[in-house]
Amino acid sequence: MVSDNTVDDYFVERIDNVSFANGVFRISLGTQEENDTRASVRLMIPANQISSILQGMASAARNIDQKVQAKMGQKVKPKPAATKAAPAAKRAPAKRGAKKK
């Protein structure tokens, strides 16, 4: 059974443009192509919703970052703190001079 609630996926790398008119933010997202950005999709967000949407995205990004950091912490365990040992005695450098015949 195929769901009627499918959503299109867009790959984006850049914010191409942001504008505001008639109470609506228009955010154009795109991909980088050589020296230019090619628009892929435009989000139209009512001004009274922009704050909650941005806060939601920031919160989701923090949660993902915390999960990634936790996984990395499991993979790379820090070495136990080494105790400071007394520095090794330094040997005096060998004297160099002209050889006698």
Image: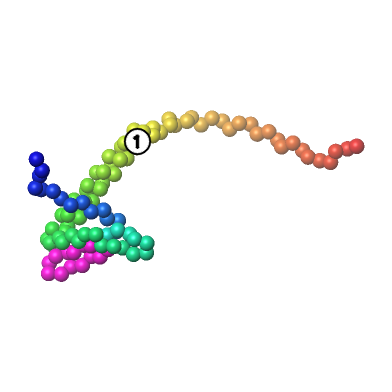
Image coordinates of residue 45 in percent, x first then y, are: 15, 60
Residue 61 visible in image: yes
Please tell me which residue is depicted at 13% across the width and 58% down the height of the picture: 49
Residue at left offset 48%, top offset 30%: 83
Left/right placement of residue 35 relative to residue 66 reads: right
Q: Quadrant of residue 96?
A: top right
Q: Residue at the spot x=15%, y=61% of the render?
A: 44
Residue 87 vertical placement versus 13 (above, below): above
- Residue range in magenta is 16-28
In the rendered image, the quadrant that contains the N terminus is: top left
Q: Give how far across and how far down residue 55 sits, in percent.
A: 19, 53
Report x, y in % for residue 29.
Answer: 25, 60
Residue at which label 1 appears: 73
Q: Is residue 69 magenta?
A: no
Residue 34: x and y in percent read 37, 62
In the rendered image, the vertical position of residue 21 relative to residue 45, given as above or below: below
> Which amino acid, by three-letter code, is at mark 1?
Gly
